[in-house]
Image: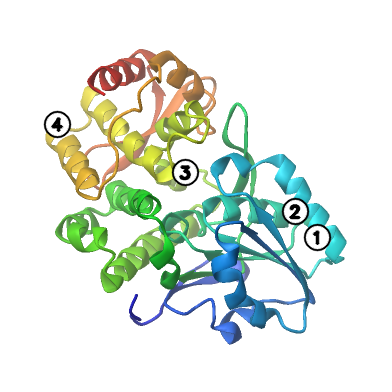
Amino acid sequence: MSHPAIQTITVPLGQRSYPVWIGAGLLGDHARWRAMLRGRHALVISNTTVAPLYLPRIEAGLDGLKWSSFLLDDGEAHKSFANVGRAMEALGQLGATRDACVIALGGGVVGDLAGFSAACWMRGIDFIQMPTTLLAMVDSSVGGKTGVNLPVGKNLAGAFHQPRAVLADIDTLATLPEREYRAGLAEVVKGAAIGDEPFFAWLEQHADALAARDPATVLEAIARKVRYKAGVVARDETEQGERALLNLGHTFGHALETAGHYSTLLHGEGVAIGMLLAAQLSERLGMSGVADTTRLRDLLERLGLPTAIPPGMQAQQLLALMRLDKKNTAGMLRLILWRGTGRAEIVAGVAEADVLAVLQAAIHLS
């Protein structure tokens, strides 16, 4: 990929504010990120796919430190308590002190697990996000949500723990498989669908360039989504209100991922299908119109994203998984729905009969 100018976006959280750098060549820009390390110890957490490609780019920046690496196998199924335990054993073997730093080099699974491990070690040490997937660059690396999966559901254990910095090196997208890249575009669409209709229109205008990975277009899309999310996080860091809107499509999507045992759908694919289901439910409840649903489906499909529930999944099974969602209160479903593009809202007390009807209709059409 060519080299558009580096963009810097600040997540404004007072003394815990941090930069998000977006551009090319950032992993090798050792002076930039080495200055964020405060102690003598560093643990790089990555996976067996990413580390051979990109760990060598950051090794020189660790010169003079006592550091080691801990590698996960690739895939959502490895975001587990067992691997958190192994990560912390690695920190112990390193002799990591309170001023140590964990570096997350990889996609969302690596970032979530590395951040959670950093939050747990000695009740919280620094970590730096170095996302290597589009999805992680635009979503999971920003905002301090960390966590692991349990057999009964996704991300049910976790902590809010903000990074020291985020380096989104778009050079890494050159080696990202097509399916992974397109899955990341779902999170870009989500930000626009929630609260930025002009950005949604921009995505419609630039869908072909985004699908083709045009560097300048990709960088602009990442920056616009990160800028939007940074503002939401600053206003509602621990998801007491507005930040919950960032979960548009996630209640449906997480249920789909869990039903597929984290192997049928990528996270972004689950979000894409989940957003469309949320739009269909909004339409059923009279909050939005068929034109809104059609507009969302058309953009997702232009970007090569799935919009149908995978074969073999049952509506009752998905509803049962949705009951475990973290946003629910007092045993009632609490979903993120919308009144059309850019107008998402939190809706409590959604009737299970309506959710079931939407799931059954979608499965019938799949």
Measure the C-alpha gap from mark 3 to mark 2: 32 Å
Residue 87: which numbered mark, if any? 2
| Residue indicated by mark 1 | 91
Q: Decide if residue 5 is in sight here.
A: yes
Identity of the residue drawn at 24% across and 45% down: 300
Helix, strand or loop under label 4: helix
| Callout 3 amino acid | Gly
Measure the C-alpha gap from mark 2 to mark 4: 48 Å
Q: Please tell me whether residue 98 is drawn above or below residue 323 in the rendered image.
A: below
Q: Earlier in the sequence, mark 1 or mark 3?
A: 1
Label 3 crowd (10 A; few <14 / some 14-19 / many >=20)? few
| x, y percent for residue 138 | 42, 59
Q: Earlier in the sequence, mark 4 or mark 3?
A: 3
Q: Nearer the viewer, mark 4 or mark 3?
A: 4
Q: Nearer the viewer, mark 1 or mark 4?
A: 1
Q: Would residue 213 be found to the left or right of residue 61 on screen?
A: left
The reply to whether the C-beta atoms of the residues labelled 3 and 2 are less than 8 Å apart is no
Q: Nearer the viewer, mark 1 or mark 3?
A: 1
Work out whether residue 207 or residue 18 is closer to the camera in this orientation and state it.
207
Q: Decide if residue 165 is in sight here.
A: no
| Callout 2 amino acid | Ala
| Residue indicated by mark 4 | 290
| Residue indicated by mark 3 | 241
Measure the C-alpha gap from mark 1 to mark 4: 53 Å
Identity of the residue drawn at 71% across and 57% down: 118
Quarter of the image where one finds residue 161: bottom right
Query: Which image quarter holds the N terminus?
Result: bottom left
Measure the C-alpha gap from mark 4 to mark 3: 28 Å
Q: Nearer the viewer, mark 2 or mark 4?
A: 2
Measure the C-alpha gap from mark 1 to mark 2: 6 Å
Helix, strand or loop under label 1: helix
Identify the residue at the far bottom of this view.
31
